[in-house]
Structure formats: structure tokens, C-alpha cells
Amino acid sequence: MSADFPTYAPSEEHELLRSSVRELAEAKIAPFAAEVDEESRFPQEALDALVAGDLHAVHVPESYGGAGADALATVVVIEEVARVCASSSLIPAVNKLGTVPVLLAGSEGLKERFLGPVARGEAMFSYALSEAEAGSDAAGMKTRAVREGDGWVLNGTKMWITNAGVSRFYTVMAVTDPSAGARGISAFVVDSEQDAGVSFGPKERKLGIKGSPTRQVVLEGVRVPADRMIGAEGTGFKTALATLDHTRITIAAQALGIAQGALDFAVGYVKQRRQFGKAIADFQGVQFMLADMAMRLEGARQLTYHAAVKSERAMAGERVPDLTFVSSACKALASDVAMDVTTDAVQLLGGYGYTRDFPVERMMRDAKITQIYEGTNQIQRMVMARQLLK
Ligand code: CAA
């Protein structure tokens, strides 16, 4: 195969990156994963370790002070962190989600001002699209931005915002023209430290990803200068959806990592656990379960890597007509696989799997969110079908 043959297979550099992230994740993140879940606390140890290893926001281009990792490398980082702690994997994943609108549509000034602090690990960046009554129907949002003098004044409440409170910056989608539907939505950068009127609701009490705070972002008369608008007025909804075309792939990566963590643990367990005078790994019924888990996981991984390479090409300016399809496809497939694989891992551990003495029940609870956020898997299927039928 010639060196420039187009391929989505990870390169030697990607595999070296995987080994180094795995080492860091096992040494510095895994030891706190159970405690972070148990106490529903932010994984500060993970943030510190990721920042020290320059792995907290690898996707930020070098021109803005970042590591300049490609989309596949970003997937590998998220996968390896999620393999030990799903909550911690939301640090690189949400930093990407919050900043992609700026990367895709922001002015040079916005990029220079807001990407540097994220690249340096001084600030995190979240994405605020959803509202209490506008989840799947994101365009039904009510948050308003009204022009006043040389700026905009934002009022409204965003809901389900991942890493709210720990992130300093937010991409906020708000209605600038209520008569124009989705074409009347604009995107803004809000700086919760500089812009008066930003507050956060209480932490949601969730089934999983308990280490990552999910809170409302409340905007009360938040005045931002006009140059904080991302792209042109009325393009915010398109930017929001174009962003998800890139970042649903990172949720797939998270799902793959969670599933791999559960599979690895289950493989180790069945070789140790003895019943009827032999290791349960010797039973064909157990072997078939493991084979199915690994087979489906590898299939989802290959689709995710394929999508990541398409994302990278699109980021570089190439027209990639099927990015929307593959992004939704890998997110839906990987998250469905992760739910099945983690549930089977609990099954393989039997009663022990159902206790908090083993990590697989946490992984099963964490996997569930990947079928829900960044668009439910029902929405992903709707997006895929629209692409097929258009
Ligand atoms: N890229 C760019 N533009 C796009 C696009 C894409 N992928 N898909 C659609 N558009 C454009 C359309 O062309 C249309 O523009 P025009 O009017 O100029 O033609 C406009 O956007 C509106 O599109 P639709 O008419 O298709 O919009 P819709 O209201 O019917 O619904 C939807 C679209 C797919 C259902 C969308 O609302 C959706 O994805 N909903 C799910 C919301 C979601 O994923 N939320 C995730 C929140 S973030 C999160 O969860 C993060 C976290 O915690 C980690």
C-alpha cells in the first residue's frame, strides 16, 4: 500500500498516543473513578493529569496554542480516558464540543481570545443548546438575545449543560429573531467570569457520569459585545448542528471506551472465577458472550474511526457530504453497543457485577447516557433517515 493511500486506520503515532494515554489514565484517573462516582464529585485529579499531559483539549489547532491533534487522535484520547472513567472523558469531549462552533464559524478574534485559555488548560468550554422544553426539538428554544446598542442582552435558561459551573466559557444558542424559526437563532460566546448575570442551577442527580456536573445555565440580562456572536446573525442553529456532526463522533468514542473497559474487566474476571470445578471462561456460553461483545465493539470502533477521518477532512475544508450520516451512525451504533456490552459484563460477573465492589455496574450506568445526549438515538435515526431520503 502506498504511503498516501487514503485510510482510516490509526497510524503508528495514533497507537503510541493510545499507549501513553492508557498509561496515564490507569495511573492517574482510574484510582479515583469509583470515588468520583460514589461522591458525585468533579474529577479534579483527572483534570490535573490531563492538563499536565496536554490531553485536556487536544483538538485545539497549534495556531491557537493547542496540541493540534486530528479528529482520530482526539477519539483515541477520549476512548482511553472513558475506558477507566466516563466522567473524566467528558473533559476532552466537552472542551471540543464547546469550541467547535468557534472553530467552524467564529471570527479570528474569537478564536484567538477564547481558544488559547482552553489549550493552556486555564479554562474549559461547554455547549449550551438544550432547554427544559427544547431537547430533541432544539430549534424550539426560548432563550432570547436582544440587540441593545453595540451589544446583545441574553435572557433564558439552558438545561442539561455538561460541565456547567466548572467550565468558564459557553457557546450559547439564543433566538435573535423570533419570527424566523431556526433561521432566527444565533450563537454567542459567554464568559461566566466576565459577563454579569450568569448563574448555575443545582447539580442534576443522575444515574451515571456522576463526576461531570450537569446543571442549568441561567442567563439574566447578560450583556455581551457584538463581536461575541459566532458567525453571522441567524446562523447559530446551523452552526450548532454542524458542530454535532463532528462531536457525535466523540460521544461514540466515549461509548467505545466505556464498553472496552467493561469487556476488559469481564475477560479478566471469567478467567479467575471458578464454578463447577473450572474457570467460567471454559464454558462455551460464556465464550460466545465475550465473542459477541468484542465483535460488536470492534465493528462500532471501525465506523467511529471512519467517521473521525471524515470529520478531520471536513474540518480541513473538504466537502464531505456523508459526514452527517456517519456521525449519527457511529454515535447510535457505538452507544447501543456500549449499553449491551456493559450489561453483558454485569451479567458475566453475576451477583458481584451488580455490586459497587466492581466497576462494571458503574460502566453500565455511564453507558446509558451515550444513548441519550448529543441527540437521542431516536434523533440519530431520524437524522440518518433524512439523509437517505433527501
Ligand atoms: N449541519 C448544518 N446545517 C444543518 C444540519 C447540519 N448537520 N442539519 C440541518 N441543518 C440546517 C438545515 O438545512 C436547515 O437550514 P435551512 O432552513 O437554511 O434549510 C436548518 O439547519 C434546520 O434544519 P432542520 O429543518 O432539519 O431542523 P429541525 O428543527 O427539523 O431538526 C434536528 C433538526 C436534527 C431534529 C435537530 O434539532 C437535532 O439534532 N436535535 C437533537 C438535539 C441535540 O442533539 N441536542 C444535543 C444537545 S448537546 C449535548 O447533549 C451535549 C452534552 O451534554 C455532552
Image (cartoon, grey):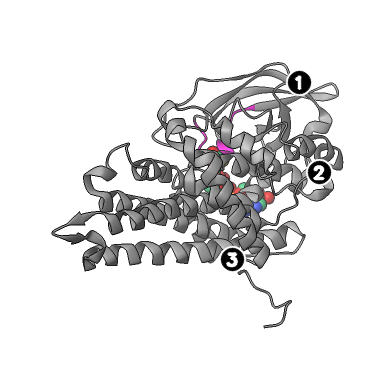
Label 3, on which residue? 306
Instruction: Identify the residue position indicated by label 2 in the image.
Output: 65
Which structural element holds mark 3? helix
**Which mark sits nearer the N-terminus, 1 or 2?**
2
Disc 1/disc 2 C-alpha distance (Å): 22 Å
Task: State which region is magenta.
Answer: 133-143
C-alpha span from label 3 to label 1: 40 Å
Residue located at (66% from left, 50% from top): 242
Disc 2 C-beta below 8 A from ligand 1: no
Label 2 amino acid?
Gly
Q: Nearer the viewer, residue 221 or 295?
A: 295
Quadrant placement of the C terminus: bottom right
139, above or below 11, in the image: above
Return the x and y of residue 356 as percentages of the image width and height: 32, 36
Query: In the picture shown, does residue 39 fall above or below 89?
Result: above
134 within the magenta span = yes
How many residues crowd mark 2 within 10 Å: few (<14), some (14–19), many (20+)? some
